[in-house]
Amino acid sequence: MKPLNDPGDLCEALGIPFSPEQLNAICDPLEPQVIVAGAGTGKTTVMAARVVWLVGTGQVRAEQVLGLTFTRKAAAELGGRICHALERADLASRDETEGGEMVLTYDAFAARLVREHGLRLGIEADARLLSGASRFRVAARAVAEHPLPLEHLSRLSPRQLPERVLALDAALGSHLATPAQVREFSLRARARFEKAPLWRGSPTKAVLEAQGAIDERLELLELVETYRELKKKLGLVEFADQQAQAVELAQSFPAVGATLRQRFRVVLLDEYQDTSSAQAILLRALFSGADTASGRGFPVTAVGDPNQAIYGWRGAAASNILGFPTHFPGATGEPAKEFTLTINRRSGSRILEVGNALAEPLTRNRGGGVELRPGEGAPDGEVRVLCFDTLAEELDWLATDVTARHAEGTAWRDIAVLTRRNDVLTSVWERLREHDVPVEIVGIGGLLRLPEIAPVVATLKVLADPLANAEVAGLLTGERWRLGLADLAALARRARELAPGEAAEEPLPLPEELTELVSRADPACAPSLLDAMNDPGQAAISGEGRARLERFTSELAELRRHLDEPVPELVRRVISRLGLEAEQLVRGDTSQLARFIAACSTYPDIDGDGSLAGLLAWLDAEEEHGDALERATPTAADSVKLLTVHRAKGLEWHTVYLPALSEGVFPGTDRTGNWSTNSRLLPAPLRGDADAIPQLADYSKRGIDAYREELKQEHRLSEDRLAYVAATRAKRLLVVSAHTWAPGLKRARGRSRYFEDAAALHEGSSMPPPLEENPRPTAARTAAWPVPVTDRAAATAHAAALVRQAREVIASGGDETGWVWGSGVASAAEQERIAAWDRDAAFLAEQLTRRTNRNLTLPAGLSATALMELRKNPVGFAERLARRMPREPKRSTRLGERFHEWVMARFSVSPGFDELEFRARAEEPELERLKRAFEASRFANLTPLGIEVPFLLRWESLVLRGRIDAVFPSDDPAFDALVVDWKIGDSNADPLQLAIYRQAWAKARGLEPGRVATAFHHVLANRLEPVVASPELIRAATAAIIP
């Protein structure tokens, strides 16, 4: 071990010429400090170097360092950097740094605290962790089981309620507020609103809306309490619950903090600007206090950037980092030292100019941020600013320019397109695919609007919600059904006729008719397009339109028969019924569909009673806020990365495109941040950061209007932070663009301030004067309408005419054997009536066939498990196919699922699980045995090529789907990979399964199947069973079902 005597020794030991501002922070004495680190200024390097300095100067030992951050990826990176730095400085060996837990996530730290000290509060460490999509599943069940009528929430559909319950529950947890506190405050606030000045003898609309939000919040509190009781009943706990428990432990038992301060001599808090009020309170209770005996002056280093505080919507309090000096004072009570890192080592100087301009309002209004400076010898970089007449022109140019950049030598993976909204992301994806650009959408939210995914989500919403008018209209006018707008408007008018309380009115123009229909929200009187389809009456719908509507309703009726299936199976059924698997196989790309199926398959079975409403609530939340609900990161694949700005934080690329910098798009419009109108928000006075945010000063219309204006300014600052983060992701090229018109707009979009700031700094930008009228007022779409009459329809009309003439001959007493074809043409009215008879007859025949015919048609897609079952027991498989019934999961099945989850967590594959989570569960002995056996196996120390890999494999006319347990590099030079299937019981292993997996992996990776080895691993026996997985096994299994 070589000691460090001065900062020069540190620079030499690490091989880094640290700047004076970095060394000031690194070599500061062992006391509280906050480091405000601008984007790209090397905060992780500085934190690692501070540990090296403290260890090298003998002030602490390596094992006495605790680091906290937000994600497992960040924890692994920070921990790895610290260990590498200690090894390079010859202060610790690899054996000494491996296996330790120097850096944890904030959530994992709170969970560990509860696990180690929970008994002080009578908390047993036997709860299962509830996270990710499973939260929505349990919330949906809580809504369904709630016993009280929901008078004020009745305007919301069942799929909207779980998200609102979870939002309010999360807000309570983030700010350590209780339902009782919110209920008491709400009643007082309502009483104050009742005293507001009247307008012409009645309460104003603003006051009525505020009172309505309070009434809804009071009912939401009932649902939140039901949700919490259900979690307790099921033995479930969330990170927010553990956070609150940890706070109570820290505040109630000073010994907890004292124990930690004895164990650790220095604490590093990463991304402190993103901590919640609850997390800040916990850390202050543990590592600060009224005097030195209770922690005042303990050496805590907080690192962050208030200009990058972009997660306020999920509970983060940007004021935490600004208040750190007084929250964590020195030993004598003086504020903690403040340091700044301003030299950016990522971006060119011209890019930094844009970033500083975007952050200027933040510094002016809030302070605390830093102005970025380029490092010595930094390249200039390039900024391009362009404006287009239409969104279509902007995206066409973007796709062309991306292709040109790649042709000039930039790798696909070094290019990113960042957007504010998911709908823009989808449009970019479509354009890039048209130009044959390999592209990856990062995160689930961006997938939901893709053309192969959107119909599935819309269909699921229609199945769950009879008032999903917007989704019904979208499906009917989509590529599959192509219903004309005139027919849709007639259907909308019929829906209004059928709605209770709807007065007869003059028909509205087509756009207004449809807009009025889909914007109605109150289920008590809202029109329903589905009701109108079931009872069209005399609506002025064309004959072909009626036929299409009947086929649409018939398809929905068929799908509704399967609503009792497990939700992932229902999703696959909808995909199959819509023909999307086969369609994507023809197009040669099933990757996005496979990702969506895999995401829905992770909607885990917590309580055996998952609901479609819960899944849809999760998807809605991902689309609206998916910036962090599902922690996805870009893969290493050589493809252009598409992601929202929220997801891009912490990442960097050579070239970054920022399209659609237009008013209303980026910056966006805030519609949800006002607690006086949004019931899922915690009232601002009850928030932990209440002193740092706008407050409603007067409970009247005037006060609400003033409060709304303050919130607009606050929202604009939050958008400014996003813009700053977006611009500072680029290393060498930043491309900023905007448009004036998009399909459907009646008013031109102005260029956003972000666009104007970039344009002002870079002359020669393309700035055509904006067009005064929209050149594309509607989205272009062409289709044959009406669809040409089919041969079947013509034959039906011919036969009907013959029947009619024969009836006339018979009625007149003539010889029925001698009659001949008369006019040969049926009138329009007759054709319509005959067509209706024909459809009725076909429907009845179909129903009869369903009841009597045992010849079943296999779906176009089968899971690997289904194919194995079909081969072994075709009769049983056919019976289950004919009448799908939910099956109670076997204990062995649940055990297998739990083991697979644990393996995923162990290899850090699943974003929803953490090894720590599994320690906190009351594991059954069988699972513990499996875990111990796996740790003793050859795979424990290997790095997998893939874990739980979803696939779609086209085998002749059949689509096979499934999930590969694991793939590892092969130690046999004859093979490139080893596909492994875990076996945890005594059941016979079927080589057909591995044959399918082998073909799927080979096709996905472009390998010859012969280069892929396969084996079953019997976990408890620690026995590897190599298998010759010949494709002949698949051919034999499918021979009877593939024509």
Image (tube, helix red, strand yellow):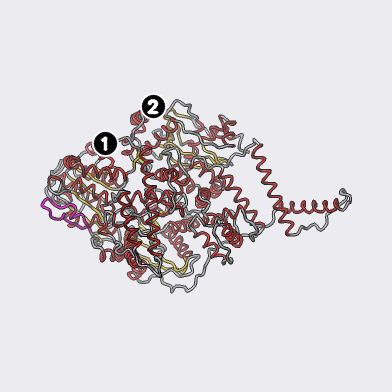
Residue 91 in view (yes/no): no
> For residue 1033, which quarter of the picture?
top right
- Tell me the quadrant of the picture where the N terminus can be found: top left
Q: Is residue 841 above or below residue 724?
A: above
**Counting other residues with Cα less than 10 Å from the Cα at mark 1, is it few (<14), some (14-19), or many (20 or more)?**
few
Residue type at mark 2: give it: Leu
- Tell me whether the residue at label 1 lies in contact with that at label 2, contact meaning CB atoms closer than 8 angstroms: no
Image coords of residue 834 (percent x, y): 73, 53
Residue closer to the observer: 845 or 274: 845
Residue closer to the observer: 62 or 968: 62
Residue lying at the far front in this picture: please name it.
201
Q: Which residue corresponds to the image point at 32% horizontal and 49% vertical from the top-left?
A: 179
The alpha-carbon separation of the residues under discs 1 and 2 comes to: 35 Å
Image coords of residue 227 (percent x, y): 38, 44
Residue 516 in view (yes/no): yes
Q: SS of the residue at dot 2?
A: loop
Q: Nearer the viewer, mark 1 or mark 2?
A: 1
Q: Earlier in the sequence, mark 1 or mark 2?
A: 1
Residue 122: mark in rendering:
1
Image coords of residue 481 (percent x, y): 59, 54
Point out the stretch of residues depicted in magenta.
323-341
Image coords of residue 1032 (percent x, y): 55, 33
